[in-house]
Image (tube, grey):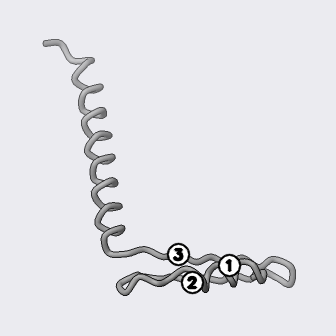
Amino acid sequence: MSVIQEELSSAVPAHPEEIRADYELRIGKHINLRASARITPAGVISTGIAVAAIILAAGYLATSTRRRGEPI
C-alpha cells in the first residue's frame, strides 16, 4: 500500500457500527491483490431493498413477455 493510501485510510473516521472486510490474495511471486470494503448497517438494508426492487422488476418483465405471446 502506498503512503498516500495509508494516510487517506487513517484520516477517514470510522463509523461506530461499520462492518469492515480486508482481503489479500497472492499468486506466485509477482501478483499481489489487496481489497478492502466498509459498509454500515443502513447500507446493508439499502442494498437489500435495491436488489429486491431489481429482482421484482425483472420478474415482472419476464412474466409480461410470456403473456404477450399467448392469445387473449
Location of residue 2 in the rendering, given as x and y in whole percent from the top left corner: 78, 81
- Residue 7's disc is none
Which secondary structure, mark 2? strand
Amino acid type, label 2: Asp
Which residue occupies 62% across, 76% down? 35
Residue 48 figure quarter: bottom left
Nearest the eye: 48 or 63: 48
Q: Mark 3 points at which residue?
A: 37
Q: Nearer the viewer, mark 3 or mark 1?
A: 3
Which residue occupies 25% across, 45% down? 56
Q: Name the residue under label 1.
A: 34
Location of residue 33 in the rendering, given as x and y in whole percent from the top left corner: 72, 76
Vertical position of residue 62 compared to residue 24: above or below: above
Location of residue 11 in the rendering, given as x and y in whole percent from the top left corner: 60, 82
* Category of crowding for the residue at label 2, using alpha-carbon neighbours closer than 10 angstroms: few (below 14), some (14–19), many (at least 20): few
Amino acid type, label 3: Ala
Vertical position of residue 15 compared to residue 65: above or below: below
Q: Name the residue under label 2.
A: 22
* Category of crowding for the residue at label 3, using alpha-carbon neighbours closer than 10 angstroms: few (below 14), some (14–19), many (at least 20): few
